[in-house]
Image: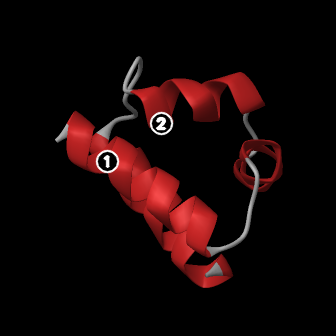
Amino acid sequence: MATAFKNQLRQLREKAGLTQSQLAKILGCSPPRISEWERGVRTPKPLTQEAIVAKLKKHA
């Protein structure tokens, strides 16, 4: 699941034309946290993942 989320996160972010910093601002977190998620260093809880994906799809 972590690999699928990190790949999906990056693809959706890039499709929306957002930088990691811009996405962090939208989500209310830090740019390093976005980087950690995209590299698979950390993975948010499943419900948080769903919320992130939903927000990104609105910006795509």
Is residue 55 visible in the rendered structure shown here? no
Colour scheme: secondary structure
Which amino acid lies under the numbered mark 2 shown in the image of this protein?
Glu
Locate residue 22, reporting x and y percent: 82, 52
42 with respect to 16 (left or right): left
Is residue 17 visible in the rendered structure shown here? yes
Quadrant of the frame with the N terminus:
top left
At a point 40% along the width and 34% down the height, the residue shown is: 44
Circle 2 residue: 38
12 with respect to 24 (left or right): left
Locate residue 54, reporting x and y percent: 48, 71
Locate residue 41, reporting x and y percent: 41, 17
At a point 46% along the width and 53% down the height, the residue shown is: 9
Circle 1 residue: 5
What is the secondary structure assignment of the residue under circle 2? helix
Mark 2 in CB contact with mark 1 (< 8 angstroms): no
Which badge, 2 or 1, comes first in the chain's sequence?
Answer: 1
